[in-house]
Amino acid sequence: MSRVKYKIGHKNNLISSGLLMKKASNYNKLIFDKISNYIVKGNNLEIGPGTGNFSELIKKKSKKLTLIDEKKASVKFLKKKFVGDSIISITESTLFNLKNKKKFDTIIMLNVLEHIKDDHSALKKLLSLLKKNGYLILQVPSFNFLYSNYDELVGHYKRYVKKDFIDIKNKMNLNIKDMYYFNFIGAFGWWVNYCLLKKTEKGKSNTAKQLKFYDKYLVPLIKILDFKFINFGISLFVIIKK
């Protein structure tokens, strides 16, 4: 796959996308509901929280929540957002540079693994940070035929299918507790916007209008129709137990 170079530019691009998705409250809640049963009420870690849309939800199921992000703009934004919060601590760090004396009960990585070229090493590092019987919760974009200019713009190395994790499982002897695709309706919308129309931004006004319509009218439909046996979706969830 060729890698087209885009100029990402100003840090506000990072924040504006996160703030736009904050408005998709129904969608965010639906994703959280998909993973909440695996979040232990303990010392938890979220990697790459961006603007903290999910951190607010994860916090409710945590005694202590550590947020790490390698982007200065995100860390600055998060520190302002959660100033004075005794449950949340925020660190500027990459996954590979993170050093923590205590291991975590749950590690959550939502749409982050695809930004890491060496995903095998990333998974080994994640498991080293996890307590025995702890859960690693992953959400990644799925199906490489949906790979678009927007994926390239935001630094995605790939999109995943189940076979990728089955191969990793066999090599690393992973204990995959659950794995399923999510949001087949959204996959069609993604294909139209980013593969057919080749959009490269989420912050355009028409995209914001689409998102508002999607969150209000289509998310309830996804909640009803998005069964695990449907072998297609815009995302893949993988739950790994140590």
Image: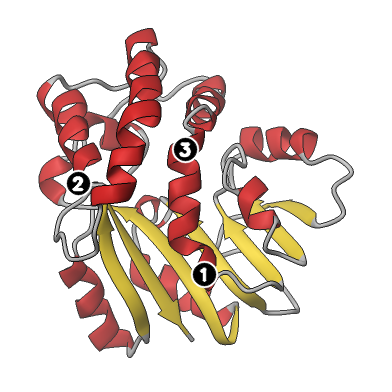
- CA gap, disc 2 and disc 1: 22 Å
Judge left or right: residue 56 versus residue 118: right
Mark earlier in primary sequence (2, 1) = 1
- Given the image, on which type of amino acid does mark 2 rest? Phe
Q: Position of residue 6 (x, y in %)?
A: 31, 26
| Secondary-structure class at tag 3 | helix
Q: Answer few, some or many: residues within 10 Å of disc 1's Cα (few below 14, many 20 plus, some between 14 and 19).
A: few
Residue 37 badge: 1
For residue 98, say whether it is visible.
Answer: no
Judge left or right: residue 196 versus residue 187: left
Residue 26 badge: 3
| Secondary-structure class at tag 1 | helix
**Front disc: 3 or 2:** 3
- Given the image, on which type of amino acid does mark 3 rest? Asn
Q: Position of residue 139 (x, y in %)?
A: 38, 57
Name the quadrant containing residue 179.
bottom left
Mark earlier in primary sequence (1, 3) = 3
Residue 238, placed above or below residue 112: below
Q: Residue at x 52, y 22 (%)?
A: 16
Judge left or right: residue 161 versus residue 139: left
Residue 36, placed above or below residue 1: below
Q: Residue at x 64, y 32 (%)?
A: 73
Residue 192, placed above or below residue 139: above
For residue 71, say whether it is visible.
Answer: yes
Q: Answer few, some or many: residues within 10 Å of disc 2's Cα (few below 14, many 20 plus, some between 14 and 19).
A: some
Residue 184 badge: 2
Judge left or right: residue 101 versus residue 226: right
Residue 203, placed above or below residue 28: above
